[in-house]
Amino acid sequence: MRLLLTLTLVVLLTSCGYHLVGQGKSNVIPEQVVSASLTSQGAAQDKALLAELRQAWIQRKSLPVLQDKTQNTQHVSLRIESASEVFTPVAFNASGLAIQYRLSVSASLKMYQNNALIWQSGLVVSSADIFGDAAALTNNPASIEAERETLLEQLRKQWAQDALARLQSGF
């Protein structure tokens, strides 16, 4: 009975497409593609995410080589769209002063081949919280801003890794 249950579980997991996200060759990028370009809409947050995405792309050997857009049919273009960075207070003390902030970086990634959309990631979001003593936050706003900038760099890197994992998994 135990063997039958184990076999059933194995069959269910393999037949439903279960696999580790971001592992292996992408099933989203067509087989014949040999090169890719990365673009953004041009806003400051788009450019920052583009730089992180380019860095993460280069580190993954299973992805096509990056080069400027060509008219080659073996080329895809990935575009970062709808990028945003949101910094909001999420918790307050009894006096109404913010003691916790949430920083979120979000954008979607779309893949085009011959000007036709062939894949889109949906919204990819990376977020984290900044905690602090209310007195310290109100007395030294420069410290919260420095913490925000450091966290923003980390979240951009995380967003790039998450976006590429989604690309490589096909989800």
Image (tube, helix red, strand yellow):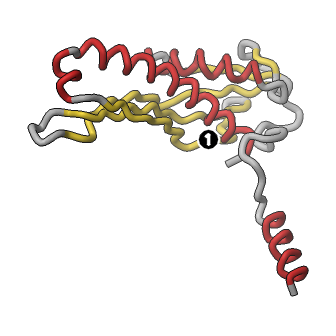
Residue found at x 30% / y 15% = 143
Residue 83 location, x and y as percent? Answer: 46, 29
Is residue 52 placed above or below 29 in the rendered structure? above
- In front here: 110 or 44? 44
Is residue 125 placed above or below 59 in the rendered structure? below
Left or right placement of residue 97 versus residue 22 in this view: left
Residue 8 location, x and y as percent? Answer: 84, 77
Choose top left, top right, bottom left or bottom right for residue 43.
top left
Q: Amino acid at mark 1?
A: Gln
Choose top left, top right, bottom left or bottom right for residue 35.
top right
Residue carrying label 1: 120
Choose top left, top right, bottom left or bottom right for residue 139.
top left
Left or right placement of residue 1 versus residue 20 in this view: right
Left or right placement of residue 113 versus residue 146 in this view: right
- Residue that extends furthest to the bottom in the rendered view of this protein: 1
At mark 1, the secondary structure is strand
- In front here: 86 or 108? 86
Residue 17 location, x and y as percent? Answer: 78, 59
Q: Which class describes the residues within 10 Å of circle 1: few (<14), some (14-19), or many (20+)?
A: some
Residue found at x 31% / y 33% = 101
Residue found at x 41% / y 33% = 104
Residue 50 location, x and y as percent? Answer: 58, 19
- Quadrant in which the N terminus appears: bottom right
- In front here: 9 or 116? 9
